Amino acid sequence: MKNALSALFLLLFAALLLGSCSTRKSVYYYQMRCPDLYIPDSLDQVLVWNRAFSKKKGNQLLLNTLEGLASGENVGDDRQAAKGILQGLEETLIEERKRKQQKIDTSYGRLQLSGEIPPPLPDSFLRALAKKGQLLASLDMVDSDQEDPHTEYARNGSQGRAPRPTATNQIYLKVCWRLYDLERQEVVDIWRSEKQFSGSSTSSDYDVLGQIISPWKNKKMKSQGYRLGRQYAMRICSTMVQKRRYIYHKGHKEMKAAYKLVKIGDWDEAAKIWRQQLETNEQKLRGPLLFNLAVYEEQKGELANAETLAREAFFLNAFQPARAYYKWLAEEQKRIKNYLWQQELPWPN
């Protein structure tokens, strides 16, 4: 016991030491993100509908049980994910405050037993919904597949690899949305996404009777669904997002002073210090300094300047962390340019 405590203390001490020696630290800031899909501000009423599942409440327990048994997954997983997806979308629409949202209360739906995407809604149904709103965000499909550690263990052994038992399931959550312009009865967007994550593998995961009695137990499915719901909301409306970036603070005391300024939100003064440090021509600091200045330009909204600095950090100063950053900045500029281009076209594009 004494040896175990000593080993634990050494591990904690080593972790603290490594953390204190890190050359970079995280900073967070909020910024407005433009959507991927342009929707005119005049279309301010969005109907939100969970088409993937039936709304009939009387047979809820039976439907959840059949769903899980038919698809081979935990009972109620997909429905929990759908709840989280709708919550994430609706909360983000409310946060934007430009578009009103309204849930559709209807028994028209279907029991989702597979990952197949249904056909679009008939025009007659869309015309009826047009009396309630202008846009319809329809959650058409939610499907999850799980690979438990026992399956992975067996497959690795059969393929000649050393079996690797794990403590978690690999879960694949697939989602499909359609967005309709109800006035024209047109599909203006179809969006598919897949999220992979790990789930805890406890005895209750394999207890079918326990799943039937308590089918809403898997909170992790709901939380992952919530993220996918917010992700689709970011596609169709402007949202305030929190960004996490790294700032390099090792080298001189001035670098630490600049990082402290960033922590209190004084980016301009921090940038002055980084520029002054660049003039010293100390080669080993050029990459980190240029990277920091790129982050400074990004938080100002000057993505082209940020990309130029990140490229200089990578190509001229061999600063490897800047490689993924300049690529992301280039893609983000393309996304914004495409959004602005959509505004010049007649709606729907």
Image (spheres, rainbow, N blue to C red):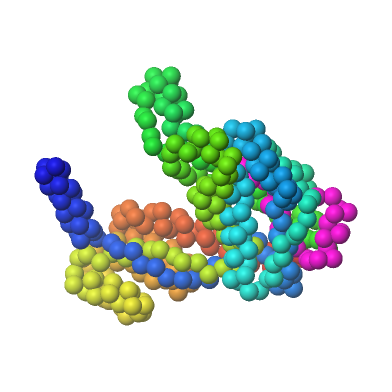
Kindly identify the residue that appears in the image at 61 percent across and 54 percent down. Answer: 83
In the rendered image, which quarter is residue 163 located in?
top left
In the image, which residues are magenta? 121-145
For the C terminus, the quadrant is: bottom right
Across and down, in percent, residue 123 comes to 86, 53
Q: Is residue 77 left or right of residue 153?
A: right
Judged from this view, the residue extending furthest toward the right is: 124
Residue 170 shows up from this direction: no
Across and down, in percent, residue 249 comes to 25, 66
Kindly identify the residue that appears in the image at 66 percent across and 36 percent down. Answer: 66
* Along the viewing direction, whichever of 166 and 175 lies nearer the viewer: 166
Q: Is residue 346 left or right of residue 152?
A: right
Residue 122 shows up from this direction: yes
Question: So how many labels did they put on this image?
Answer: 0
Across and down, in percent, residue 161 comes to 37, 23
As drawn, 91 above or below 118: below
Q: Is residue 208 magenta?
A: no
